[in-house]
Image (cartoon, rainbow, N blue to C red):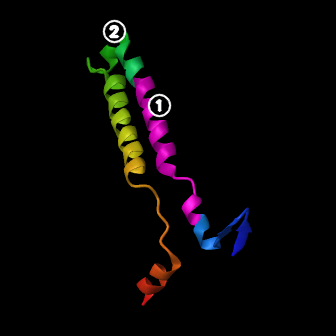
Amino acid sequence: MTQTGNRTRDPADRSSTLFDLRYLIGGLFTLYGVVLAVVGLFDSDAELAKAAGIRINLWVGLGMLVVGLVFLAWARLRPLKHEPADAEADAER
């Protein structure tokens, strides 16, 4: 055990302070989704003609926005938890 200020921390508790990548992934998907959706709203006629009249940037941007928001909600609703060492020992038996 290590002493941190007036708290005692077990080295196994460090895993509970790891950065949750779901926030990073969700944030990037959300940001890129917003950018693509805005670009898709202003597609030129030439870009629409290349895509057979479908606003691909808009639809992909909205899809990315939904995926990003799902990742952010998932990370918010189900945060990372660290099980105590006793529970890990019981699980091995």
Q: Going from the N terminus, do you reach mark 1 or mark 2 first?
A: 1
Q: Residue at x 43, y 34 (%)?
A: 30
Q: Is residue 20 left or right of residue 12?
A: left
Label 2, secondary structure: give it: helix
Q: For mark 2, what is the residue?
A: 45
Label 1, secondary structure: give it: helix
Residue 29 appears at what percent x and percent y? 44, 37
User: Does the stretch in magenta take in 35?
Assistant: yes
- Place residue 3 in its image quadrant: bottom right
Predominant secondary structure, magenta span: helix
Report how many numbered discs are placed on residues in the image.
2
Give the distance between the C-alpha atoms of the residues marked 1 and 2, in whole angstroms: 25 Å
> Tag on residue 31?
1
Using the image, determine if residue 91 lies above or below residue 31.
Answer: below
Using the image, determine if residue 45 lies above or below residue 93.
Answer: above
Question: Split into 4 quadrants, where in the image is the N terminus?
Answer: bottom right
Residue extending furthest toward the left: 53
- Place residue 15 in its image quadrant: bottom right
Toward the viewer: 50 or 7? 7
Badge 2: residue crowd in 10 Å (few <14, some 14–19, many ≥20): few
Using the image, determine if residue 78 lies above or below residue 49.
Answer: below
Q: Residue at x 73, y 62 (%)?
A: 5
Q: Residue at x 51, y 50 (%)?
A: 21
Residue 79 appears at what percent x and percent y? 44, 55
Observer-side mark, 1 or 2, equals 1
Residue 52 appears at what percent x and percent y? 26, 20
Q: Which residues are magenta?
A: 15-36
User: Does the stretch in magenta take in 10?
Assistant: no
Residue kind at label 1, given as amino acid type: Leu
Residue 42 appears at what percent x and percent y? 38, 12
